[in-house]
Amino acid sequence: MSAPTEPKAAGPRALTWARRRRAVGDFWRLYRQNRAGVFGLVILLLFVATALAAPILTPDNALSLTNAPGTPLEGPTGAYPLGTDSSGRSVLDLVIWGSRVSLTVGFWATFISIAFGTLLGVAAGHFHGWISTVIMRITDWFLVMPSLVLGVALAAVLGRSLTTIIIAIGVTAWPTTARLVRAQTLAVEARPYIERARALGGGHWHVMSRHVVPNVMPIVLAQTTLMVGTAILTESTFAFLGLGDPTTASWGATIQAARDVGAVSARMWWYILPPGFAIVLVVLAFTLCGRAIEGVLNPKLRERS
Amino acid sequence: MNNAILSASDLRVEFQARRGPDRARAVDGVNIDIGEGEIVALVGESGCGKTTLARTLLGLERPTAGTISHHGVPLSYTSRALKAYRRLVQLVLQDPSGSLNPRHTVYEAVAEGLRVHGDVVDERDRVAQALARAGLRPPERFFLRYPHELSGGQRQRVVIAGALVLNPKVIIADEPVASLDASVRGEILALLLRLRDELGLAALVVTHDLGLAWNIADRVAVMYLGRIVETGPVEKILTAPEHPYTQALLSVLPEAGAGEPIVLQGEPPDPTRIPPGCRFHVRCQVLASGAAESAGVDDHCRRVDPAILSGGTDIQVACHYAHALNDHVH
């Protein structure tokens, strides 16, 4: 047993930070051993960098319909490596700008659903009796609500915009998280240290914030990364169905535009494939990261792989 | 008893059974007093309600009837009153591995009580002091350890330190050594005794092991099916038990040596169906042997519930046969 030797003067806060640093170091060491996870992380970082650098990588008029840089539906050339769309915009530039939309929607929709799901899941697991029953019935109700139908209805009411899509995805995606978190909360609450915390005088808030949430977080983290992929996919579906904001260049919207001009029958592969591959790559990257995190946090999975 | 630091009077705790309309009477009328600096052992088999009684004394379970009082003041169940009460009465659980959050270091586990009560002045010193009192020296070496890096005995010491840090007056220990190695048991029990001597700490030790009671307790209360059936000083109860149930428990102790082990007959007790009359009569070896009949109390045993024992430090037994024998002597 190696005793961590801290300077005697170190206060509890310094000790806590030292411990956290060590925990992060351990996490990264284990994550690195998962090659697929590292691969996913690299792809993800590339996409994030691309999204952030979009204004630098593309000309100012890259998204302009009236002042498009090229002529419509050109094949791949030196100037336009992936050809142009029906308005004469570079498909490569559209894909670059599309990463912004996809990542934004992925982040916010996931944030909403995870925040809602965790909050309600912990509450449903912690409080017994009618609170739990009411929350779980509401969860069931949202669980069976189809996100596409809700999206169409919301688009009709709120107008077609990115916000509408984010809300539609966020509102329909939280019940799975809530159920997952509730199950984990119930498991944690059955442990004797919860009883000890109560006997020490800890109230609901203490038990939830100090014991339940930290123990539920790993599962939430893994669920988050998996959900981002789903959210991006759903956003593309919405855009493809014409529910997206017509003024933003998202991957789904580009595929829809390609279909509208008959890109498939005209064999304009450069128009329809790149945004499709971008979707597949990002979703794959998030899934790989999610599985790697799950593996690190759950030693049982680690042994199997 | 007025100088009792913690007492329960006519305590009843009932649970709704999961299926059916039955109500389980886990604690069915209990009077118990714990004096200052006194160690009381609560002995009984699994399911007799001793853990429920301990949880109720801690205020973790609300009694169906009866009161818990502290220095004669009845416990009120507002969250503020309960929180204040928690500083005085602390819990040590059976399984030290489970009663520590695996994600918390020793320091955090011990400081938890202080943080709950917003008592953060000199936190570091007080945590160190509590660890040292619990026998973990030097305390600084243990601050950053995680529970899984400690042995079972060390974990239980951390749990005890976490309770001590609040300077309680009473510790309620639910099977404190049941999950520890035999070699460590003695150390933890010695720790409890030392804490009593040094800090004047009173303790209620819940156990199924009469041998353990013999080692540390001043007084023993034997519980059967939700009620205390015999109580008195440890020497008296363990050398001259009067209740047939206590006699049966003692007869199977390897240390007892003398006498045939008494194996109880009949079905195991079920708190949803407490027998009429004496609750032990269906399994009572004295009644089965006919001794109760020759003493003329067998009818009593089957029909009349013996009176609930009062609290205090007196020697008491809830048995018609024992009463008949005593009357005969006098």
Image: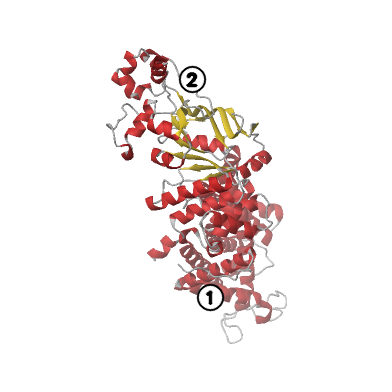
Whether residue A144 is visible to the viewer of this picture, yes or no, is: no
When the figure is inspected, residue B158 is found, relative to residue B304, above or below; the finding is below
The part of the image, by quadrant, that contains residue A238 is bottom right
The residue positioned 64% from the left and 31% from the top of the image is: B72
Please, what is the three-letter code of the amino acid marked with disc 1? Val
Q: Is residue B38 left or right of residue A11?
A: left
The residue positioned 71% from the left and 80% from the top of the image is: A60
Q: Looking at the figure, which quarter contains the C terminus of chain A?
A: bottom left
Task: Using the image as rendered, state which of residue B99 and residue A68 is in the foreground.
Answer: B99
Q: Which residue is mark 1?
A: A42
The part of the image, by quadrant, that contains residue B88 is top right
When the figure is inspected, residue B275 is found, relative to residue A29, above or below; the finding is above
Asked whether the beta carbons under mark 2 and mark 1 sit within 8 Å of each other, the answer is no
SS at mark 2?
loop
Question: How was the colour assigned to the protein in this rendering?
Answer: secondary structure
Give percent across and percent down for residue B93: 49, 46
Please, what is the three-letter code of the amino acid marked with disc 2? Ala
Q: CA distance from mark 2 to mark 1?
A: 76 Å
Give percent across and percent down for residue B42: 47, 35
